[in-house]
Image (cartoon, helix red, strand yellow):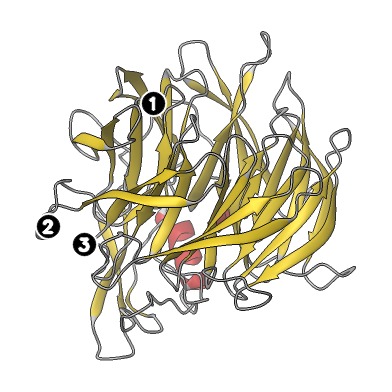
Amino acid sequence: MLQYWSKSMAGGLLCLAAVSLSATAQATSMPVEGLNGAISVVMSKDTGGAKRHLYVAGRDDNAISVFEVKADGSLAFVRAYYDGKDGVDGLSYVSEIALSPDNQYLYAVGRLANAISVFHRDAATGALTFVQILKNGMDGVDGLHEASGVAISPDGKNVYATAGHDSKVSIFSRDAASGRLTYTSVLENGQNGVQGIGGSFPVTVSPDGKSVYVGGGTESTIAVFARDAATGALHFSQVMEAGTNNEHGLVGISGLTVSPDGLNVYAASWGTDLGLDSTVAVFSRNPDTGELGFVETHANKTQAGGDVPGMWGALAVKVSPDGGNVYVSALYGNEIAVFDRAAGTGALSNPKAVKQGKDGVDGMTYARDMVVEPEGGNVYAVSRVDNAVVWFKRNGGALAFGDQYRKPIGSAEGAQKLLANTDDAFSAKVKGSAPLLGAGKPLMAAASASHRRGRGDGHLQLA
């Protein structure tokens, strides 16, 4: 095992920045490409017998990888698309991807590209064709400086993108036939009555299309917007704050989702203590107004009153299509926390976990994002250090390891990638707390497929 450490410029604190597995840890499947720094994953729906495909954003590769999903849930690598090759643009440090409701188009935001890109999807092969790029500051486009999050309305009429650097949310109208976007407007924190989107990152749209929710990473908030179905415009409605003692569990918010029944909103939050005080918070949702009411929080067990073992560094949160379970990825816990969800209240119970190195699980080092198959039978997770996609079979909500898919990096390539990226400053600054890490400089370096980096914009997005 090889490790890379970083020294804080403030106090000389040493912090583990990355761990890479030895080259002997090989996946049983065919080699894949484009997964270095895997950070976001989406899956197409089954549309009358068409093939299903999985798409993974590899941030350190500036790439999107495509897999075919077999009938049994296993994956077959198709190909990878790289920024600057074959006409592709906008994937520099790609941060998040999203599929249109009709499965015909994929949208990607690139943090260093300051852009959102549009790709057409071939339903038969899963192949992507570059269609369009919109860049911050060009043709009047605003709100994409270091773009970090993207979401599409269920009716397919609008795309919403967040940019934590400027604390903005940009709004685009979408042509259903061509997939192309037209910039319409931008919301900025503190302007025109908008609150709670400081350090904006996670963004999600309710299943009924009436509401948009944005997490304020540096304010530890959820901003609630009412959505105009005709125009896609957003109107500020409410801000939910962490509370004096983080009783609402929103400090360092990193993930947001709405339950399929539209009755609950779930937030995963990093916390303040290097992720040790991570939480998942449950909110009730008013179907008419979209406004939220606090229900409960669950915390990493290392904290007083915490009930979730190993949920260290909570990042993404997802609800199963049947509404029966909630899943939370834990970056430093190298796991997915699994909860039972109560119908009606949305309350969570019976926390369990699938964890790297236990029960045959592999490929989960620095678990980052996940997607539950629309049909509900499988869960797919991606990890930033193992540079892997991990397949889990879902049975009654419980997860069983199926396989992993990755391309191990040799020492020379790993060292080159590491040294090429160590000048990036990273921080973990949240409202009401001092920075956890200062500008990182390498103290020791060894071959590593990935390393711990922040967004460089004050976000708590440490993966």
Marks 3 and 2, the one that precedes in the sequence = 3
**Position of the N terminus by quadrant:** bottom left
The location of residue 285, given as percent across then percent down, is 46, 43
Q: Nearer the viewer, residue 33 or 311?
A: 311
306 relative to 171 in the view: left or right: left
Q: For mark 2, does the 10 Å Cα neighbourhood hold few (<14), some (14 to 19), or many (20 or more) residues?
A: some
Which mark is drawn over residue 302? 2
Q: Report the mark closest to the observer, 3 or 1.
A: 3
The residue indicated by pointer 1 is: 28
Reply above or below: 418 against 372. below
Per the image, label 1 sits on a secondary structure element best described as: loop
Q: CB under 8 Å between callouts 1 and 2?
A: no
Residue type, label 3: Leu
The location of residue 259, given as percent across then percent down, is 46, 35
Q: Is residue 84 visible?
A: no
Q: Residue at image x 46%, y 50%?
A: 256
Marks 1 and 2, the one that precedes in the sequence = 1
Residue sitting at the far front: 288
Q: Nearer the viewer, residue 365 or 213?
A: 213
Residue sitting at the far left: 304
Per the image, label 2 sits on a secondary structure element best described as: loop
Residue type, label 1: Thr
Q: Nearer the viewer, residue 424 or 114?
A: 114
The location of residue 335, given as percent across then percent down, is 27, 43
Which mark is drawn over residue 276? 3
Q: CB under 8 Å between callouts 3 and 2?
A: yes
Q: For mark 1, does the 10 Å Cα neighbourhood hold few (<14), some (14 to 19), or many (20 or more) residues?
A: few
Q: Residue at image x 70%, y 65%?
A: 113
